[in-house]
Amino acid sequence: MRKLLPLIGSHPGGRSALTCRYRCGDACFQEVPNTSDNEYVGDVMAGALSRRSMMRAAAVVTVATAAGTAALASPGMATQAAAATADRHYPGHPGRPGHPGHPGRPTHKAARGLRFDAVAPNTADQVTIPTGYEQNVVIRWGEPILRGAPAFDPDNQTAKAQAGQFGYNNDFLALLPYGHGRQLLVANHEYTDEQLMFAGYDSDNPTREQVEIAWAAHGLSVVAVQEERRSGKLTPVQRHHVNRRLTVTSEFRLAGPAAGSDLLKTSADPTGTKVLGTLNNCAGGTTPWGTTLHGEENFNQYFANGSSATDKRYGLPTGSSGRKWERFDDRFDVSKEPNEPHRHGYVVELDPYDPDSTPVKHTALGRFKHEGATATLTRDGRPVLYSGDDERFDYFYKFVSSKRMKRGRSRHARAHNLTLLEEGTLYVAKLTGDSPAGQIDGSGALPSDGEFDGSGVWIPLATAGPRGAVSHVEGMTAEEVFVFTRLAGDKAGATKMDRPEDVEPSPRTGKVYVALTNNTKRGLEGQAPADEANPRNANKHGHVLELTEHWHNPASTRFAWSLFLVAGDPEDPSSYFAGFPKDKVSPISCPDNVAFDPYGNLWISTDGNKLGSHDGLFGVATHGPRRGELKQFLTVPTGAETCGPIIQDRRVLVAVQHPGEVSGASVENPASQWPDGPGKIVRPSVVAVWREDGRNIGC
């Protein structure tokens, strides 16, 4: 007899209960993991940076750069500097009249790149695009991509077949040049929804075959795609020699300061350097040296019996896991392998051009629920990487490498560049508002200066160098900082944010944009109240923060910030669109992934729209007289989320994740007919959109 999952009500941010269960293990229905008070006192970390500590750091880190010096500066001094500048704005702050980024008086035309007819909010079971545009499904779950893989047959699926086929629930996407009218498509496969994959699925008693299929459907895919010359259409090149699948049973290498630590050793891997699998890969990024980055997010839900775990801040289940993987592999049972969860929650680096390479999990970037991993370069060529921790009241981070990127494609340059994320300093953000506390009442009403803004400081947590690593957090070793990064952020007094997800620096201006999806527990009894960076209690729609590094130097330890968008219905007094007239924008709810087009416009995909429409993709001008004008470009089918946006000159790509994932849905009772129509199983897929006339998007 088929047994349905016991599903609870809809997600506070708009997701279905089915999505809550399979994507994040009902995270929003659990107790908030962050119970710290985060009162930042100047001497909280002073002990970690005593004279002795500074001498140790100097011996460990051999970085003769300004950022290297800043990485070892006293947090107390940094806090004083931030306080001294709290009432003024650094050069380049966009919020003041007279600055070229200030809205001023809108012109008649939309910004270049956004000249399309906005798609109206809707609930159509399709990908709805603007008039004058066309689309195609590039690739679906289950399409064969490796040699020997069979055609997809949902009624006779096997783990061996799935390991050679495109994975489930595509999230982050990257397109990399490959020559001869081809590109490499790289995709994350965040999670599986077994109820929509297997007919008659019994969540209490999954079969080994079902579990092994799910293992093979997680992970990453690399697929060569062919471009159609006269349009934006893409088609996969099946069984191309560069195509690749990485799954829960593939080998990954741990690198950086925590690799080999006792905290990462297991009975299967006494070296603490080799890991099987990557879990819950959400957003990611590409690097200037041609690799892709993949953030492991809700890894905690895959483990069972975590009541004795040392890392209480990560929400490990105390009983059985939702998928029951621990019945088939002891590494998912924390009571048997207490260190296995410590080996997940990192940023993974993949070289998609080398199908024989071993992907790397970078411990120097910290361990938390990574949502996104995007890189930029300092003026002297050192990578700076930003990442959000997707949890209510958690933080966003920055890593500044101590190594310079080598230009070119030589073997030596590529080998060097694959080590760039192993040495440097990991920071966490602390934000200070510049308005009186009494003007931030949780309603979202703007303070008297007309915007939510202020200054901030990057607090160093630990520095890794060629001779070892040093902690800047009192009471924690460097290894502990890199493995229990959330605890280090607590001790440092970082600012509790409303689910910081994707973080993206603009390639044109260097300004950094942080998508904060929502936090319906903000301001509730026993929880953190509203502050200027998170100004609404029971924040169900989210907001987007704009950050300007001091003197536009991404290695700086100081920054200015303002809220670029406060999402919601434009008729809601608490919504805000960078000062642009609110009667001329599209409504938006729950910003998730962000990307930039060639003109510097920010594109935002949503997850959990709380305004009654399906999720979608939006473009918004970030500079010039139309700054803040937001227009909806597409919506996705019933139950789906918009992920992985890529905006090229002539093409937009989105990952349509978990279509049909509506409470009560199943293989036998589908809630969507996308993408193949009635009688066909619902399949997460990648979609390309282009102009009918072949011209550039939005021009």
Image (cartoon, helix red, strand yellow):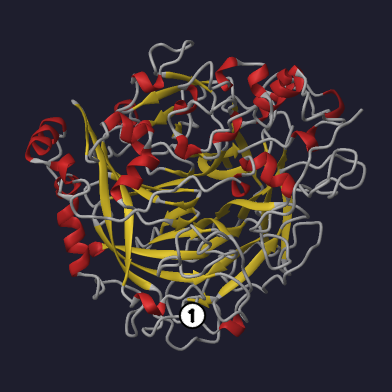
User: Do we see residue 185 in this rendering?
Assistant: no
**Residue nearest the observer in this picture, 319 or 137:** 319
Left or right of residue 429, residue 319 in this image: right
Task: Check the image and report above or below for 516 versus 582.
Answer: above
Mark 1 crowdedness (10 Å alpha carbons): few <14, some 14-19, many ≥20:
some
The amino acid type of the residue labelled 1 equals Ala
Residue under the image location 68 percent in, 58 percent down:
14
Kindly give the residue lying farthest to the bottom in the view shown.
105
Task: Check the image and report above or below for 10 versus 550.
Answer: above
Assign a secondary structure to mark 1.
loop
Residue under the image location 21 percent in, 59 percent down:
79
Q: Which residue is mark 1?
A: 445
User: Do we see residue 640 in this rendering?
Assistant: yes
Residue under the image location 35 percent in, 31 percent down:
418
Residue under the image location 16 percent in, 34 percent down:
61
Task: Check the image and report above or below for 232 versus 108.
Answer: above
Left or right of residue 124, residue 435 in this image: left
Left or right of residue 562, residue 474 in this image: left
Picture coordinates of residue 569, whole percent (x, y): 63, 75
Q: Quadrant of the N terminus?
A: top right
- Quadrant hosting residue 226: top right
Q: How many marks?
A: 1
Q: Quadrant of the C terminus?
A: bottom right
Picture coordinates of residue 20, whole percent (x, y): 67, 46
Picture coordinates of residue 446, whole percent (x, y): 45, 80
**Residue nearest the observer in this picture, 641 or 326:** 326
**Residue nearest the observer in this picture, 3 or 357:** 3
